[in-house]
Image (cartoon, helix red, strand yellow):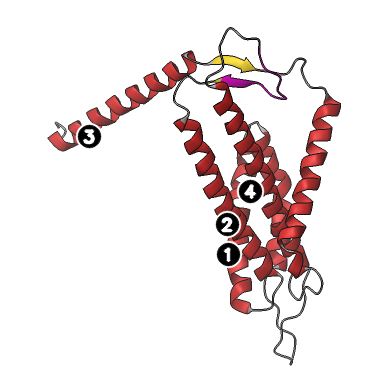
């Protein structure tokens, strides 16, 4: 049975778009030239120092963003701590991505004849307009700021006793648990890489925070008891 004309046209348009996107991606890869790289591959000690510094920065930033919750937390301490750490990590990761984009922005006009610049990781140059990187910086700043705001508010709501706010936190953590579960299952199915391993490692902590975030009413008092 012949396909309807609209279906054939849609399929043809989809094929053309896929081919064009693939060609554009391959062309962009062909234009890349390495312009920044470490003088020597960083050793294990260097990466350990970087990770330790990043974790400490995330902890300090998370505590700073939620400092009003800690003197006398009335809600879930565990959920508050997990969300605060996530907010701090979002700040650290966002700052690193912005730094990476700005460094790439600086390298756009760098002559390819010059020796590679020093860097902790390999950075490839993409020929093009600097507006690409300015847009990237703006996008990271906006999305990162929104994520940090949501995580900070969620941490503060988890530290309170309002039932509605606590259930909102439960829903937010439920989404995270679903995402971590998906990554963990994919890892068990054979998918490699740190995103899948991180989902497997974070799942127990997220489940514990999800359970602890639920509002608990004290017997006969009508008040919310501090939880985990």
Secondary structure category for the residue under label 2 = helix
* Alpha carbons under labels 4 and 3: distance apart: 36 Å
Sequence-wise, which precedes: disc 4 or disc 3?
3
Vertical comparison of 133 with 19: above or below: below
Q: Residue at x 53, y 19 (%)?
A: 109
Badge 2 or badge 3: first in the primary sequence: 3
Q: Secondary structure at mark 3?
A: helix
Identify the residue position indicated by label 2 in the image: 175
User: Is 11 rendered above or below residue 146?
Assistant: above
Q: Quadrant of the N terminus?
A: top left
Q: Earlier in the sequence, mark 1 or mark 4?
A: 1
- In contact (CB < 8 Å): disc 4 and disc 3: no
Q: CA distance from mark 1 to mark 4?
A: 14 Å
Between the C-alphas of marks 2 and 3, the distance is 34 Å
- The x, y position of residue 43, in whole percent, is 82, 22
Location of the C terminus (image quadrant): bottom right
Sequence order check: which comes first, mark 2 or mark 4? 2
Range drawn in magenta: 116-124
Q: Position of residue 159 (x, y in %)?
A: 72, 71
Q: Residues within 10 Å of mark 1 (few under 14, many from 20)?
A: some
Decide: marks 2, 3 in contact (CB < 8 A)? no
Task: Examine the rendered structure and indicate whether residue 57 appears above or below residue 69.
Answer: above
**Which residue is the site of mark 4?**
180
Taking the image as shown, residue 52 lies to the left or right of residue 158, namely right
Q: Nearer the viewer, residue 71 or 11?
A: 71
- Please name the predominant secondary structure of the magenta segment in the image: loop
Alpha-carbon distance for marks 2 and 4?
A: 9 Å
Residue, disc 1: 171
């Amino acid at each position: 049975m012949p396909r309807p004309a609209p279906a054939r046209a849609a399929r043809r348009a989809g094929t053309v778009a896929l081919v064009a996107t693939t060609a554009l991606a391959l062309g962009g890869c062909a234009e890349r030239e390495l312009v920044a790289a470490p003088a020597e591959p960083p050793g294990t000690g260097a990466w350990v120092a970087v990770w330790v510094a990043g974790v400490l920065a995330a902890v300090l930033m998370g505590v700073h963003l939620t400092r009003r919750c800690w003197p006398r937390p009335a809600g879930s301490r565990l959920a508050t701590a997990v969300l605060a750490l996530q907010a701090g990590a979002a700040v650290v990761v966002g700052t690193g991505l912005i730094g990476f984009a700005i460094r790439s922005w600086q390298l756009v006009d760098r002559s390819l004849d010059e020796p590679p610049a020093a860097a902790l990781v390999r950075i490839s140059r993409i020929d093009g307009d600097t507006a690409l990187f300015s847009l990237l910086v703006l996008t990271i700043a906006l999305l990162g700021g929104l994520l940090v705001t949501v995580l900070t508010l969620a941490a503060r709501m988890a530290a309170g006793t309002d039932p509605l706010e606590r259930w909102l936190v439960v829903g937010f953590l439920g989404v995270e648990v679903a995402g971590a579960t998906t990554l963990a299952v994919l890892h068990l199915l054979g998918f490699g890489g740190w995103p899948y391993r991180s989902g497997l490692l974070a799942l127990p902590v997220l489940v514990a925070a999800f359970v602890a975030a639920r509002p608990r009413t004290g017997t006969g008092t009508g008040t919310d008891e501090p939880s985990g």
